[in-house]
Image: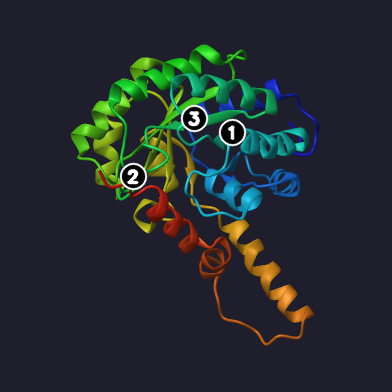
């Protein structure tokens, strides 16, 4: 299919399914608005991803504290789906609530034109004073995957279960991923894989495609080896969006005649999302003493 040729949402989902069924490992483009989606397709990327953290920055200018609502996320996904010429994965976080909320999430994102979505087993929003990597039970995670599968209308829409290998013992990661596979997930997304030895242990009992969020981990930079272990998609992060933040800041500084600043994109994001304010509000309103 030519890159810039119009395609239906069903055709894009079928293209994503073909990617999952293939034998190669592809790297996703971070797409956050219609222009970035068109650029990614024109440059030949096979798949794009709309990150939940990126959507929060783009829509709210807020830190990644699970503040964006389903409707806000879907609005941005719809803008991208309206013009996209490549399949786009939506990082649907925890499905914006319980299993019933997951069903609503699937309905809305399918309508938006998304080709696939990830549902993670993270306990979100994080409880006060707890780590943002706390996980729900396996049973609840399985319920969410089953609910997502029940809610989709187009069977080509891929439902990918996500978990965090960086906060669990290997045996627990295997229990979770095997349970999600048994529940009918079309793929498994894993965050926090350390190296190939770690990945091999996790991948061995799985028969469905894998998606890794690596953030550029140098110990996982071998596409042929990843593909042999069943990895079909790698998400290296969202450098394109952060480059846009940096470019915007530098351009506006120059317009105002302000001397160059050496703040990097991460520092700029921290500065302008005001996380300290949110943390202070959390301490004020969520740290309830009995």
Local SS, label 2: loop
Which mark lies nearer to you, 2 or 1?
1
Contact flag, marks 3 and 1 (Cβ < 8 Å): no
Q: Report crowding for label 1: few under 14, some 14 to 19, many 20 or more residues within 10 A (C-alpha).
A: some
Contact flag, marks 2 and 3 (Cβ < 8 Å): no
Q: Residue at the spot x=25%, y=30% of the render?
A: 174
Residue 55 % position (x, y): 60, 46
Q: Report crowding for label 3: few under 14, some 14 to 19, many 20 or more residues within 10 A (C-alpha).
A: many
- Give 206 or 82, whichever is nearer the viewer: 82
Q: How many marks?
A: 3
Q: Farthest residue toward the front?
A: 290
Q: Residue at the spot x=56%, y=58% of the render?
A: 239
In this figure, which colouring scheme has been used for the structure? rainbow
- Give 227 or 53, whichever is nearer the viewer: 53
What is the C-alpha distance between the residues marked 3 and 1? Answer: 8 Å
Q: Quadrant of residue 248?
A: bottom right
What is the C-alpha distance between the residues marked 2 and 1? Answer: 21 Å
Asked whether residue 221 appears in the rendered view, the answer is no
In the image, residue 192 sits, relative to residue 277, either above or below, namely above
What is the C-alpha distance between the residues marked 2 and 3? Answer: 16 Å
Which residue carries the number 3 mark?
95
Which residue carries the number 2 mark?
133
- Give 118 or 63, whichever is nearer the viewer: 63
Residue 113 % position (x, y): 68, 28
Residue 119 % position (x, y): 46, 30
Q: Which quarter of the rendered picture does the C terminus lie within?
A: top left
Which residue carries the number 1 mark?
70
Left or right: 16 with respect to 111?
left
Asked whether residue 257 appears in the rendered view, the answer is yes
- Give 260 or 173, whichever is nearer the viewer: 260
Residue 228 % position (x, y): 38, 36
Q: Residue at the spot x=50%, y=12% of the render?
A: 150
């Amino acid at each position: 299919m030519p890159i810039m040729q119009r395609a239906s949402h069903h055709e894009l989902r079928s293209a994503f399914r073909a990617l999952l069924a293939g034998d190669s490992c592809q790297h996703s483009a971070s797409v956050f608005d219609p222009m970035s989606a068109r650029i990614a397709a024109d440059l030949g990327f096979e798949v794009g991803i709309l990150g939940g953290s990126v959507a929060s920055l783009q829509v709210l200018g807020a830190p990644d504290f699970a503040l964006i609502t389903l409707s806000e996320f879907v609005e941005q996904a719809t803008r991208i789906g309206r013009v996209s010429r490549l399949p786009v994965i939506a990082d649907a976080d925890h499905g914006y609530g319980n299993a019933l909320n997951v069903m609503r999430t699937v309905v809305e994102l399918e309508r938006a034109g998304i080709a696939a979505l990830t549902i993670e087993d993270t306990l979100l929003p994080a409880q006060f004073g707890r780590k943002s990597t706390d996980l729900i039970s396996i049973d609840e995670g399985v319920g969410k995957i089953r609910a997502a599968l029940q809610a989709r209308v187009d069977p080509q829409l891929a439902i990918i279960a996500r978990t965090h290998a960086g906060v669990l013992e290997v045996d627990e990661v295997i229990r979770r991923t095997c349970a999600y596979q048994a529940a009918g997930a079309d793929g498994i997304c894993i965050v926090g894989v350390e190296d190939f030895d770690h990945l091999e242990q996790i991948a061995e009992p799985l028969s469905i495609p894998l998606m890794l969020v690596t953030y550029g981990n140098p110990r996982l930079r071998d596409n042929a080896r990843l593909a042999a272990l069943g990895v079909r998609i790698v998400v290296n992060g969202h450098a394109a969006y952060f480059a846009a933040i940096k470019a915007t800041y530098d351009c506006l500084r120059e317009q105002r005649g302000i001397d160059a600043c050496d703040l990097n994109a991460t520092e700029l994001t921290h500065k302008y999302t005001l996380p300290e304010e949110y943390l202070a509000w959390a301490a004020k309103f969520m740290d309830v003493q009995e």
